[in-house]
Amino acid sequence: LICLHGGPGGDYGCFYKMLPLAEERPILLFNQLGSSGSIIDDDIDNAEKLKQFYTIDCFMEELNDVVKFSEFKNAAQPS
């Protein structure tokens, strides 16, 4: 189970109540790039450069990377 929060400015804290489910399945609490202390490259120093990261394609790529890195088995792959 991968828990994703709703967007910039939020964090995964709202999903802590789901952690008991980890006794039955792997759970990953995921912070979106740029949210709640996630690190963005030091070269991204203004809003115009940051916009390149706030796209659906970028978020889907991040999620795919998390799934691959976590080695979740039988995970549904986004199309």
Image (spheres, grey):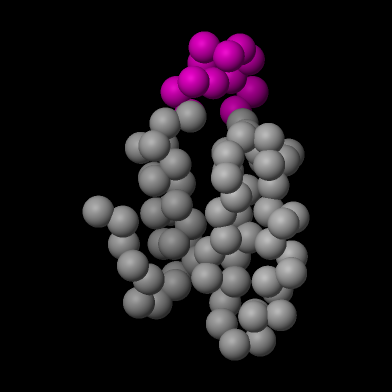
Q: Is residue 54 above or below residue 31?
A: above
Which region is colored magenta? 41-53
Q: Position of residue 32 (x, y in %)?
A: 58, 43
* Residue 39 in view (yes/no): no
Residue sitting at the far bottom? 24
Residue sitting at the far left? 79
65 and 6: which one is in front? 6
Quarter assignment of residue 47: top right
Residue in view at x 44 percent, y 72 percent: 72
43 and 48: which one is in front? 48
Residue in view at x 59 percent, y 65 percent: 28
Left or right? Give the position of 74 relative to 1.
left
Q: Position of residue 38 (x, y in %)?
A: 67, 40
Q: Position of residue 19 (x, y in %)?
A: 70, 73
Residue in view at x 57 percent, y 77 percent: 26
Q: Is residue 45 above or below residue 31?
A: above
Q: Position of residue 25 (x, y in %)?
A: 56, 82
Left or right? Give the position of 24 relative to 14.
left
